[in-house]
Amino acid sequence: MERSILGLVLAVVVIAPLAMGAARLQDFAVVQVLVAAASLLWALRFWVRRAHRIQWPPVCWPVAGLAVYAVARYLTADVEYVARLEMMRVLVCVWLFFIVLNNLHRQKNTELLVKVLLGLGTLLSMYAVYQFLAKSNYVLGLRRPEQYDGRGSGTYICPNHLAGLLEMLIPVALAMLLLGKDTILQRVFTGYAAVVMLAGMGVTVSRGGYLAFGLSLVLMAAFLVRFRNHRLVAIVSLVALLVGGGVFLAKSPQSMHRFTHMFVPGQLEHVGIRWSLTKKTTQMWLDHLWVGVGPGHFDVRFPAYRGEALQQRPTYAHNDYLQVLAEWGTIGGVLFFGTLGLLAAGVPVTWR
């Protein structure tokens, strides 16, 4: 039964990114069905194996609090339909977290999940490189918005979303190469995956993705230099990746265009637009300090905050942390950042 649950979780992990991040309702419905099936099998485990117990580390408290808070905010939201969709996404993600925690905590399951994710990241990066080289602006036969021309996004519509996935997967692949005890063949696969995903990250031409990825590399190197056996390799790898990234930026017309237009007023890439959006989002949060404007309500409420410098419809805050605060308020922010903090606090324990 554990293998069946593992198979369903792997299906979610693979299908959701391949289906454009499960952003469309019909794709998210598939994810819901898979999670519901895994939930049924989990319930059967309690009946078949009476010794099965619920795992409840400290991080579960803020996660459960997020679920309860999501339901409460849905019941008090201004636009029921918008809030319901956002609430369902929160509940599905929270429940999937508990399914994985209580059924797939064995090391072999974790290793399989990681390898599947690395394989998925490799395939998406290959597709993104093809889009970049072929100058294709289509994703699975669907036309992307024109502002994404010349950028790779894999099976996502927005290149930034692929960059967000890869900036989490590439450090894992590099850590497995430097610290792992895999066989030679497995290390070759991991190294190949890392190289392809680095290429995928490059062709997204995501400024925020580059910044977050570079910061993660610096933090990873700072951690590894504490160990004498990995100190030299960590420093050399960091320098090589940063230099390689700089060369790519200098040689790529798309990258240079986005970076050189950051300080040109009137351009979509102008940094002032993002700064204006950040200020308006912050004001939205401060005006609804404790509970926010409502789940998924950023786009609903933003017209009241749009100023002269920002005439577009941004749809999102383009800053995940500010978006959490604006939509869920300080209470939601405490639950969200509390979850991240407890997860980070558990890393040293897991490392030992």
Image: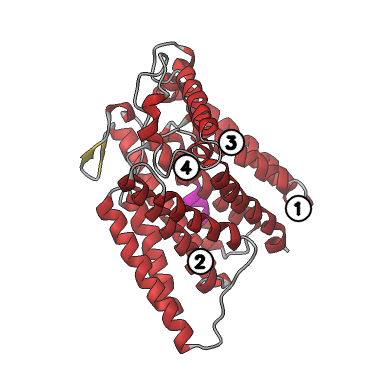
Using the rendered image of the protein, determine whether residue 256 is visible from the camera's viewpoint: yes
Tell me the SS state at disc 1. helix
**Disc 3 packing (10 Å; few <14; some 14–19; many ≥20):** some
Q: Which amino acid does label 2 sit on?
A: Phe
Q: Position of residue 65 (x, y in %)?
A: 55, 57
| Residue to which mark 3 is pinned | 214
Tell me the SS state at disc 2. helix
Determine whether label 2 and label 1 are within 8 Å by CB: no
Q: What residue type is labelled 3?
A: Gly
| Residue to which mark 2 is pinned | 98
> Which residue is at the far top?
265
Quadrant in the rendering for residue 237: top right
| Residue to which mark 1 is pinned | 229
Q: Position of residue 138 (x, y in %)?
A: 25, 38
* 274 and 149: which is toward the camera: 274
**Disc 4 packing (10 Å; few <14; some 14–19; many ≥20):** some
Pointer 2 or 1: first along the chain? 2
Q: Which amino acid does label 1 sit on?
A: Asn
Q: Position of residue 49 (x, y in %)?
A: 50, 88
Q: Which of marks 2 and 1 is in front?
A: 2
The Cα–Cα distance between marks 4 and 1, rounded to whole angstroms, is 30 Å
Q: Which of marks 4 and 1 is in front?
A: 4
Pointer 4 or 1: first along the chain? 4
